[in-house]
Every structure is written in C-alpha cells, then in structure tokens.
Image: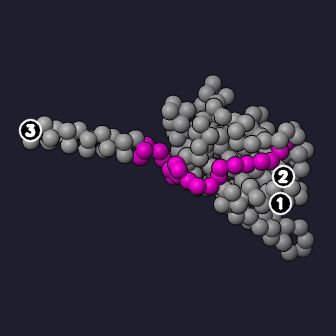
C-alpha cells in the first residue's frame, strides 16, 4: 500500500513539474489571467470599428505608439514585420494592431501610410482623445504629450507589446527590446496551442 501511495505521489509531482515546465517555455513575460487588457473599441485606418473579438482565432499583437516616434515604435514594428516574415504561411493567423497614442497627428490617412508600410496586414487603430485614454487605461499604458523647445511636441509612452492567444486571452507581455526571436518563439507556441 505504501509503495502504491508513493507511486501515486511521485506521478502527481511529475505531472505538476511538467505543467510548470510547459508554462516556463515562454521567453516573454507570462501574464495569463491578468485582469486588464480585456477590451478595445477603436477604429482601424480603413475606417472600420474594431474590437478584440474581431480577431478571434488569431494571435493578436498590440503595440501602443505614434508615427512621429523616433526609436521604440519603428524598432518594434520592424521586429513584428520580421516575425510575420519568419512565420511564413502562419502569419495569416497573427494580427498586429498599432494603437496610436497621438490621435491629434495620427489621422487615418497617416496611419494608412505608416502601419502597412511595415507589413500590409498590420492595422493602425485610432480613437478620439477620450477613447484613446480609455483604451490606454484598460491596458495600463502610460502616455503624455511633451512640448519641445521651439514648438511642436513628442509623446512619452510605455513601449511594451501585448500578445493575445487565439481564444482572445491576454497571455504575454514583451518589454521593449525583447527582440523578434523571443516574439517569434512565443507566438509559435500560442499558434500551436
């Protein structure tokens, strides 16, 4: 009886360890079960109202930025375009959404030129100032206009990337600089799951 109990206990411990190992496969930060990033209601650069539910069945990658951004935004978009290329045919099962934090300058026309230049299937999303603020709050994203000497302005903003699984659940957060390889690795895991 003790031997049977020991075998059952060992089997349970091994199963638990395997479950932890599976969760640890992600290279990005696993935020599964997070209580934010549950909704989004903005308009894409083609004028179509969009919600997260529109993309069920795809891995959804969301980045908040602005088109006048000199570094983090184009770098992240270039990395995401590389991920799309490296996914090959599976890229059709991924949707990248670039959410502007600068709706004053990032008009639909500007987003329509900027976002698809990285990859034609990528969508730029915009909203009113209130819709942008509501969406940023839902995703816990910081952004603020900063006046420049001599006129004009730039935007300070969080520069992380959110990744949803095909069931529409927020699963991963990539800090700026995580790199295309880590994104590709984890997106492949989500597509396989």
Residue at horizontal 20 percent and vertical 41 percent from the top: 10
Percent x, y of residue 69: 77, 57
Q: Nearer the viewer, residue 62 or 83?
A: 62
Of callouts 3 and 2, the N-terminal one: 3
State the residue position of label 1. Answer: 130
Q: Name the element at disc 1.
A: helix
Q: Nearer the viewer, residue 169 or 122?
A: 169
- Cα separation, mark 3 vs mark 2, equals 66 Å
Percent x, y of residue 41: 77, 48
* Residue 33 in the figure: left or right of residue 37: left
One can see residue 180 in this view: no
Q: Tell me, what colour scheme is on the image?
A: one colour
Q: Nearer the viewer, mark 3 or mark 2?
A: 3
**How many residues crowd mark 3 within 10 Å: few (<14), some (14–19), many (20+)?**
few
**How many residues crowd mark 2 within 10 Å: few (<14), some (14–19), many (20+)?**
many
- Do residues under tags 3 and 1 come within 8 Å of each other at their CB atoms? no
Query: Which of the 4 quarters of the picture holds residue 168?
Result: top right
Q: Nearer the viewer, residue 103 or 169?
A: 169
SS majority, magenta: loop
Q: Nearer the viewer, residue 5 or 22?
A: 5
Residue at horizontal 90 percent and vertical 71 percent from the top: 151
Q: Is residue 139 magenta?
A: no
Q: Which mark is residue 127?
A: 2
State the residue position of label 3. Answer: 1
Q: Name the element at disc 3.
A: loop
Segment colored magenta = 23-45
Residue at horizontal 8 percent and vertical 38 percent from the top: 1
């Amino acid at each position: 009886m003790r031997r049977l109990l020991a075998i059952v206990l060992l089997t349970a411990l091994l199963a638990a360890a395997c479950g932890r190992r599976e969760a640890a496969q992600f290279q990005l930060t696993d935020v599964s079960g997070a209580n934010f990033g549950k909704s989004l209601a903005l308009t894409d650069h083609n004028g179509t109202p969009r919600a997260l539910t529109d993309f069920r069945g795809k891995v959804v990658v969301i980045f908040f930025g602005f088109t006048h951004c000199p570094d983090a935004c184009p770098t992240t978009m270039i990395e995401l375009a590389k991920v799309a290329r490296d996914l090959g045919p599976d890229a059709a099962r991924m949707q990248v959404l670039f959410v502007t934090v600068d709706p004053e300058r990032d008009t639909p026309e500007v987003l329509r030129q900027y976002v698809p230049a990285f990859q034609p299937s990528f969508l730029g999303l915009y909203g009113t100032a209130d819709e942008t603020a509501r969406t940023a709050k839902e995703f816990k994203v910081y952004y603020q206009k900063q006046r420049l000497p001599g006129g004009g302005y730039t935007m300070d903003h969080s520069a992380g990337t959110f990744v949803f699984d095909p069931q529409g659940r927020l699963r991963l957060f990539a800090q700026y600089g995580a790199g295309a390889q880590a994104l590709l690795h984890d997106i492949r895991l989500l597509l396989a799951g």
